[in-house]
């Protein structure tokens, strides 16, 4: 494992080749921001119960959440980009960030089992092997630009916190309640 990966991440093919020779059985990580990509990680529940908000027929995992959100805005699930199936049966959807990386996070904006990797993040690359399986690429090998509707969906929303901070009218419990209502 390469320690301090954030400082050592590189696009230099010579360095990558040297690491591959030094660590032939190592898995590969991709520094998302450095690579100019945003990865949408649609995960599986792994025993986690569905939140009340997502107790909708047909929603069983992060990919279902993303498909549902696409349908709500008149779009279709993004099948035109590189998809990597994870050993846990989730999927990583790769997109070009078009020079506009986003803040990464887990279950951003309340999207159950939908995480993002971008600014300061990394993702396990295809062909990497874990004890429960291999990261496998789907049929599409191109990385599409991040669709605007997906960017809007996964970009952390700041306005909720700005409204709470600027009003300063609520007590602490009321502030928490106000934030929770908007999620």
Image: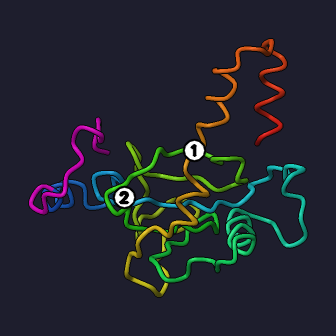
Kindly identify the residue that appears in the image at 19 percent across and 51 percent down.
Answer: 10
Q: Which mark is residue 27?
A: 2
Extreme residue toward the top, this view: 171
- Label 2 crowd bin: few (<14), some (14–19), many (20+), radius 10 Å: some
Q: Quadrant of residue 100?
A: bottom left
Q: Is residue 71 above or below residue 155?
A: below
Kind of element beneath mark 1 = loop
Q: Position of residue 68 (x, y in %)?
A: 75, 70
| Residue 162 painted magenta | no
| Residue 12 painted magenta | yes
Q: Which mark is residue 77?
A: none
Q: Position of residue 7 (x, y in %)?
A: 23, 37
Q: Position of residue 20 (x, y in %)?
A: 21, 60
**For the magenta stretch, what is the residue range?**
1-15
Kindly identify the residue that appears in the image at 76 percent across and 31 percent down.
Answer: 179
Marks 1/2: CA–CA distance: 30 Å
Q: Which mark is residue 156?
A: 1
- Label 1 crowd bin: few (<14), some (14–19), many (20+), radius 10 Å: some
Q: Quadrant of the N terminus?
A: top left
Extreme residue toward the left, this view: 14
Q: Is residue 115 above or below residue 144?
A: above
Q: Position of residue 77 (x, y in %)?
A: 63, 77
Q: Foreground: 11 or 71?
A: 71
On screen, residue 1 versus residue 140, left or right, reads left
**Mark before the other along the chain sequence, 1 or 2:** 2
């Amino acid at each position: 494992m390469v320690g301090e990966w954030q400082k050592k991440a590189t696009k230099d093919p010579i360095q990558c080749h040297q690491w591959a020779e030094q660590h032939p059985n190592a898995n590969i990580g991709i520094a998302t921001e450095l690579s100019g990509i945003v990865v949408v990680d649609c995960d599986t529940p792994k025993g986690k119960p569905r939140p009340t908000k997502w107790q909708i027929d047909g929603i069983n995992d992060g990919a279902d959440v993303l498909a549902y959100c696409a349908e709500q805005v008149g779009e279709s699930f993004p099948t035109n980009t590189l998809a990597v199936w994870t050993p846990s049966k989730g999927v990583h959807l790769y997109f070009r960030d078009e020079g506009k990386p986003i803040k990464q996070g887990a279950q951003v904006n309340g999207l159950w089992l939908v995480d993002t990797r971008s600014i300061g993040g990394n993702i396990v690359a295809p062909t990497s092997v874990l004890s429960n399986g291999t990261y496998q690429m789907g049929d599409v090998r191109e990385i599409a630009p991040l669709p605007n509707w997906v960017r809007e969906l996964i970009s952390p929303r700041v306005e909720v916190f700005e409204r709470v901070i600027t009003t300063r009218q609520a007590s602490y419990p009321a502030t928490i309640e106000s934030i929770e209502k908007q999620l």
